[in-house]
Image (cartoon, helix red, strand yellow):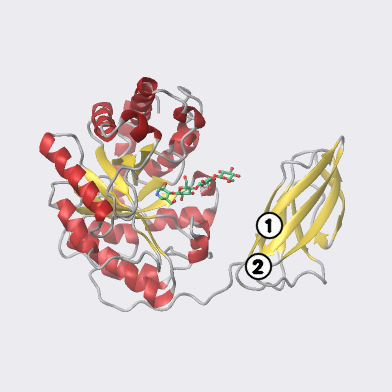
Amino acid sequence: MSTPTLRTIFASRAARKVLALAATGAVVATGVVALSGTAAAATTLGASAAERGRYFGAAVAANHLGESAYVNTLNTEFNSVTPENEMKWDALEWSQGSFNFANADRIVNHAQGRGMSVRGHTLVWHQQLPGWVGGLAAAQLRTAMNNHITTVMRHYQGDIHSWDVVNEAFQDGNSGARRSSPFQDKLGNGFIEEAFRTARAADPNAKLCYNDYNTDGQNAKSNAVYAMVSDFKARGVPIDCVGFQSHFNPQSPVPSDYRANLQRFANLGVDVQITELDIEGSGTAQANNYRTVTEACLAVTRCTGITVWGIPDHYSWRASGTPLLFDRNYQKKAAYTAVLNALNGGQTDPPDDPPPTGDGCTATISTNQWQGGFVGTVRVTAGSAAITSWTATVTLPSGATIVGNWNSTRSANSGTVRFTNATHNGAVAAGQFTEFGYQGTGTGSGATVTCAA
Ligand code: G3I
């Protein structure tokens, strides 16, 4: 995706989109569709959202793109993606001036191959900054910020629908003040305006968003963002959209004025987007909250799309709160049905969540390596429910050969080796663990393990 090949890639992406659209009848890449008005209710989140002139996206992690259930769900249900971490500053420019786009490119290429649009997240944020950024003096920091924005946006020019140009620049609480960060502390209040002006110059066709959390209802923080956007619009500072992250849980529920808050921002002449939606809980209560959020977006003409912050619950940054639309077995939850029905304009009560199957097990591995040999110890930990048996699948580096094992039975000596529990250690109580081990020749460090129960 370097500049010389950009036109070629963009052209082929556009061609693929035309084919995809011909097949599905939906336009997703710009988040805007022409409606027939008589279309039958669609059966996936993306297609249903497209029928309402919106996109429905998910945060995606590059390291899950090799998992078939994950990819199938992504491809079937969603028509927009946001890289969860791969476009953050530490991922792209760990060393000053040296850019690594490999993981972000994987996600963008996957999205383009399926006709999905991409949200860029995020160019200027106080978190996930490499250490060198904090050490710069003001003039160097200004240059580094503008260089980062320009280099990243040019790399993806034509590929990104909307960019979170600045993320989370305001404090929580009642002050309405800016948050301390290297940018704020060294460049002052003007850094946000400068970032947006630089972004517009780098890619004039991308929509430029300000993105934040705890701004979902009217409060001191959202009022401060509102004042900034209002000022930007009045002075012609380029800004096209405001992202409302919408991370909800019992301590931070969906505010009663959620829709009104989206609408007041839209009234300023910007699009609004729900950018990182997740709602902790389960069953009907969770489903009703998801329905409320979806209906709020549909009620605001300039709410152009919804992105959920992950696909299955167990990959969420808040996994223990089961905040997403699919359970760990990729079964659709009641919340999924509520969103789909809302997108289709229906009032049907969602069915219950699929019966709980527990959340299985996780496994970690530690290897004691010496010249020519190794011992591996694997810890199998039960999830929130007890398990009665388990299988840990260990992938060994090439050349490693297992010569013995304990507290388990083993399927092979090398390569991918399945260890199942012995008779005495199949039962593991919720949250507890058991361990087994193996000894081998060659190099065993670097082995990886997955667990199923
Ligand atoms: O990939 C490394 C792994 O190699 C290492 O062993 C492990 C040990 O800590 O860390 C792994 O990286 C983690 C990364 O997620 C990938 O899992 C980072 O430590 C961890 O800090 C990072 O957390 C992300 C967080 O942002 C901070 O960047 C979450 O996945 C991501 O969901 C979260 O997303 C943010 C949005 O960007 C902004 N809004 C809030 C939202 C939730 O916090």
Task: Please indicate, yes or no, whether residue 193 appears anywhere in the rendered image.
Answer: yes
Q: Is 411 situated above or below 371?
A: below
* Residue ID at (37%, 30%): 152
Image check: 358 left or right of 353?
right
Residue that mark 2 sits on: 431
| Front residue (pair 136, 406) | 136
Mark 2–mark 1 Cα distance, whole angstroms, equals 12 Å
Question: Of helix, strand and loop, which one carries label 1?
Answer: strand
The residue tagged 1 is 363
Residue 395: x %, y % from top left: 71, 48
Answer yes or no: disc 2 within 8 Å of ligand 1: no
Left or right of residue 402, residue 249 in this image = left
Tag in front: 2 or 1: 2
Lower sequence index among marks 2 and 1: 1
- Quarter where residue 113 is shown: top left
User: Callout 1: 10 Å neighbours few (<14), some, many (20+)?
Assistant: many
Q: Could you tell me the amino acid type at mark 1?
A: Ala
Tell me where residue 192 appears, x and y as whole percent: 27, 35
Residue located 36% across and 72% down the image: 287
Which amino acid type is marked by label 2?
Gly
Q: Nearer the viewer, residue 238 or 302?
A: 238
Q: Position of residue 2 (x, y in %)?
A: 40, 24
Where disc 2 sits, the SS reads loop
- Of the numbered discs in the image, which one, if any, rests on residue 37? none
Q: Is mark 1 within 8 Å of ligand 1?
A: no
* Crowd around label 2: few <14 · some 14–19 · many ≥20 (10 Å): some
The foreground one among 131 and 350 is: 131
